[in-house]
């Protein structure tokens, strides 16, 4: 979902995408494990979960994401041991916020990611067009959203 966001390592002041407090109580859209050998492993290796607020669920279910939609990409280290794959420390928390007027240059979406899920450590800032949106253009026909809801 946020290909490239992890490559941005400098926090930019004036971040306009808010941290998604309470996202774990939102609708869980899907989970995925990206293992070594996958082309996105360097940036997104681990276990990720996608969460959506009610507005984002309108988009997942109806095809058009309205303003106010928020999608969260929660990436954790994958820890393998004793025959199980479990969640390790949080690597990054990525967010897409739909606001057509504010984010016209990036398909109507604002992007941010926080290192370790720490609200004090944003890593995208003003670099959203290059760090995130450039990859999301590949799924323009899906509203610039890679994930699909699975019931």
Image (cartoon, grey):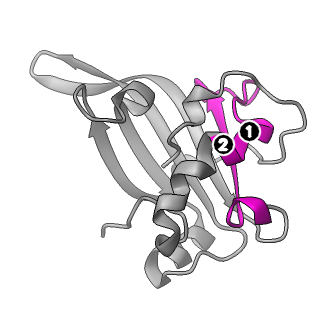
Q: Residue furthest left?
A: 83
Q: Is residue 20 visible?
A: no
Does residue 70 lie above or below 12 as drawn?
below
Q: Circle 2 sits on which residue?
A: 130
From the viewer's perspective, tell me whether residue 16 is left or right of residue 113: right
* Numbered range of the magenta stretch: 104-130
- Determine whether label 1 and label 2 are within 8 Å by CB: yes
Mark linked to residue 46: none
Q: Position of residue 37 (x, y in %)?
A: 22, 28
Q: Residue furthest top?
A: 81
Determine the residue positioned at 54% across, 37% down.
4
Q: Circle 1 sits on which residue?
A: 127
Decide whether residue 128 is among the magenta residues. Answer: yes
Determine the residue positioned at 45% across, 79% down.
61
Q: Position of residue 57 (x, y in %)?
A: 52, 72
Q: Secondary structure at mark 2?
A: helix
């Amino acid at each position: 979902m946020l290909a490239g966001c992890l490559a941005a390592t400098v926090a930019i002041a004036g971040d306009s995408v808010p941290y998604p407090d309470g996202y774990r109580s939102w609708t869980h859209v899907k989970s995925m494990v990206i293992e070594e050998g996958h082309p996105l492993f360097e940036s997104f290796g681990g276990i990720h979960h996608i969460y959506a607020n009610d507005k984002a669920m309108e988009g997942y279910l109806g095809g058009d994401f309205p303003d106010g939609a928020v999608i969260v990409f929660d990436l954790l280290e994958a820890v393998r041991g004793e025959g199980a794959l479990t969640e390790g420390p949080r690597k990054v928390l990525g967010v897409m916020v739909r606001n057509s007027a504010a984010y016209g240059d990036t398909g109507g979406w604002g992007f941010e990611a926080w290192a370790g899920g720490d609200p004090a450590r944003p890593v995208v800032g003003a670099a959203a067009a290059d760090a995130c949106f450039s990859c999301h253009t590949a799924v323009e026909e899906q509203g610039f959203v890679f994930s699909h809801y699975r019931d």
